[in-house]
Amino acid sequence: MNELWDLASDETHARVLLALATVPGDEVTGRLVAQHGAVETVRLALGAHAPHDDLAVEAWRGATTPKLTMNTFGRAVQATVRAGLVAVFPDSPHWPAGLDDLGHRAPLVLWAKGDLDLLTARVDQRVALTGSRAATEYGLAVGRDLARELAEREVQVVSGGAFGIDTAAHRGALAFDGPTIAVIPAGLDHTYPAANRDLHARITEHGLLLSELPPSTPVSRSALLARNRIIAALSGATVIVEGATRSGGMHTAGQALALGRPVGAVPGPVTSIASSGPHRLLNQGTARLVTEAADVLDLLAGRPNAPAPTAVGPAREFGPEPVSRQAVTAPNGAAAGSSL
C-alpha cells in the first residue's frame, strides 16, 4: 500500500491508475478529479479520507479500490513502452482542446501512436465521418469520396477504425495521403478489429491511432459507446453516412448534438435500412443535408447550405401569359367579356 501511495503522489501516475480502475467516461471519477485532482482522488479511493456523505462516491470507492494495484500499473507501463505508444495528459501541448467540452466525461489520459501534432489542430479543422459497419456499396463509395475530398482540403478525417463506413473514411483520406485519426475502443497494443491490421498500420504512418483505454484492455460494449463521445468532441462537425436508427453512428450524432456541434447526414435510398438513421436526423431537422464535401465545409464554418441553382428561368419567360384581374374575378372562372 505504501508503494501505491507513493506512486499516486504524481498527477500523471494517478491518472493512469484511475484509467486502469474505472470505466471510460465515468462522471463520478471526472467530478472528483475536477474538484480535487487525480492524486487526491486516488487517495480517496485508498481510504485516506473518512466515508463520503455522497452515496455515489462511496459506491465508486467500493468499486474502484480493489482495482488500484501496483501490478496493473506496472503491466500498463511495460505494454505502453513495448507497443511504442505515447501517453498524453491534459497538461500536454498535444491534448486536444475539444475534449475539454466533455466536462466530467473527458478522458483521464489518451494513449496514442502516430503523428501527435494532429492533435494540436483546431476543432474546426476536423470532421467525424462515421456510420454503419454493415455498409452498402453506395455508403462505402460516398464515405470514401467525401473523406478523399476533405483530405484534399486539408481537413482531418476522424472515425472509429471499424469495418464499413469507418474503414471507407480512413481509406479515402489515406488515398490522398491526408491526415486521419482513428479512435479505438480497446488498448492500442492489439488491433481491433483484427482484420484491419494493415489499415491501422497505414494510419500509424500517415495519421494517428488514439484510445483512452490502457494497453491490453479488450473491447467491450461500454467502451464502444464511450469512444463515440471522443470522436464527436475531437471534431468540429459529425457526418453520418449510413446507419440504422439505433446504431453507433446515431449514438455519435447524439453525442455531437449534446456538445452543440453541427451534424450532417447523407441521404440514401428510402428502401434502405442503412439510410434510415440519416433520414430520421434530416426529418427531425437535427442534421443538415450532406451530398458533397462543400456541404461539410459549410458545416465546419457554420455557414448555411448554398442554395440550389435555379433550374429554369423567370416565370415571365417560360410560364403562361399573365392573367388579368377581370379573368380571375369573372363568374365560373371565365374571362370577363368572353362567351362560352
Image: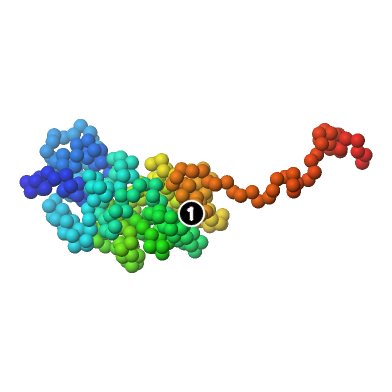
Q: Position of residue 118 (x, y in %)?
A: 32, 53
Q: Is residue 332 left or right of residue 33?
A: right
The front one of 80 and 54 is: 80
Of all residues, the one furthest to the left in this rendering is: 2
> Which three-letter amino acid code belongs to the residue tagged 1?
Ala
- Name which residue lies at 74% across and 44% down: 316
Q: Is residue 258 above or below residue 140?
A: above
The answer to whether residue 127 of the structure is visible from this angle is: yes
- Name which residue lies at 38% across and 59% down: 178
Q: Position of residue 105 (x, y in %)?
A: 30, 43
Q: Secondary structure at mark 1?
A: helix
Q: Position of residue 80 (x, y in %)?
A: 20, 58
Instruction: Give the color scheme: rainbow, by chain, secondary structure or one colour.
Output: rainbow
- Name which residue lies at 52% across and 49% down: 289
Hey, which quadrant is residue 35 in on the image? top left
The answer to whether residue 136 of the structure is visible from this angle is: no
Q: Is residue 227 above or below residue 84?
A: above
The front one of 338 and 193 is: 338
Q: Position of residue 64 (x, y in %)?
A: 19, 45
Q: Is residue 49 left or right of residue 282?
A: left
Hey, which quadrant is residue 130 in on the image? bottom left
The front one of 188 and 248 is: 188
Q: Is residue 173 left or right of residue 137?
A: left
Q: Which residue is mark 1?
A: 293
Q: Is residue 195 above or below residue 87?
A: below
Mark 1 is surrounded, within 10 Å at the Cα level, by few (under 14), some (14 to 19) or many (20 or more) other residues, namely some
- Name which residue lies at 48% across and 47% down: 298
User: How many labels sit on residues?
Assistant: 1
Quadrant in the picture for the C terminus: top right
